[in-house]
Each structure stands twice: as C-alpha cells, then as structure tokens.
Image (cartoon, grey):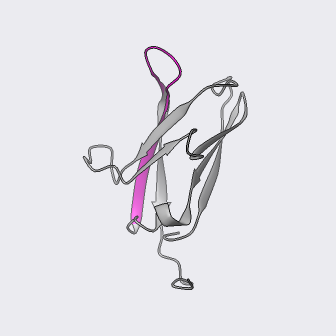
Amino acid sequence: MVGYSYALRLEASAALFPDGAMFVGQVRTKVAADQVLITLSTEAGGFVRISDQELDLNMAANETAVLSVGSVVVDVVRMDLDPDLHLGFALEIPVMLPVTRGLA
C-alpha cells in the first residue's frame, strides 16, 4: 500500500542467507527501467537475515510513498562475496492505493 510500511519474508529451500552476508536490491517500476525508486540493503535495514533460509524484505512508509499504483520489481544481490552474487530470482510486488490515507 502506497505510504504504508511493507514487509515480506523470503524463504529458500537452500542456505542462501548465511550469517554475516550482506544483501542489496533495487526497486524499479519494471526490470528495464533506468530509475531506481528504492535501494534496499542489509546495512540500512531493507533486508534483515532471520536464518540461513529466511530473509525479511522491509520498506518504510516514506519509501512506499514514492511508489505508483501498479507493481514494482526487486531482486537480491549478495554483496559480501567477490564477485557479487545475484541470487537468481526477482520479485514483482503489487502496489495499491489504500482507501485509508492522508492521516499524518
């Protein structure tokens, strides 16, 4: 929902999210879009490791406020390896305009 915080738990069947790993992902309107809307990272709390097989993706309300109704895409890259490792998946997240808005 535009203007509200968003959280999604990612679960993998393999140990994709080891302790100490650092992750980054760019949120865009579509894969080919040049403009990055949001950059998520472990460093900034956009990704939070739960276990070797679970990773939380988080977007704050001020971040989702810049999104437009439709959908966005994001992928996940592991940054603590050399070279960086793309985890091999992308997510398409629906973006909706909430009925209850403008409360702040």
Front-most of residues 52 and 11: 52
Front-most of residues 23 and 72: 23
The image shows residue 26 at horizontal and vertical percentages of 41, 43
Please state, as top left, top right, bottom left or bottom right, where the C terminus lies in the image. Answer: bottom right
The image shows residue 79 at horizontal and vertical percentages of 49, 26
Is 78 magenta? The answer is yes
Does 49 sit above or below residue 7?
above
The image shows residue 8 at horizontal and vertical percentages of 63, 51
Magenta stretch: dominant secondary structure: strand
Query: Extreme front residue here?
Result: 43
Query: Extreme top residue here?
Result: 82
In screen coordinates, is 16 left or right of 86? right
Is 20 magenta? The answer is no
In screen coordinates, is 17 left or right of 82? right
Does 37 sit above or below residue 77?
below
Residue at 66% across, 25% down: 20
Residue at 36% across, 50% down: 28
Does 72 sit above or below residue 70?
above
Question: Residue 50 is drawn in which quadrant?
Answer: top right
Residue at 66% across, 32% down: 12
Residue at 63% across, 55% down: 7
Q: What stretch is highlighted in magenta?
A: 70-86
The image shows residue 65 at horizontal and vertical percentages of 45, 68
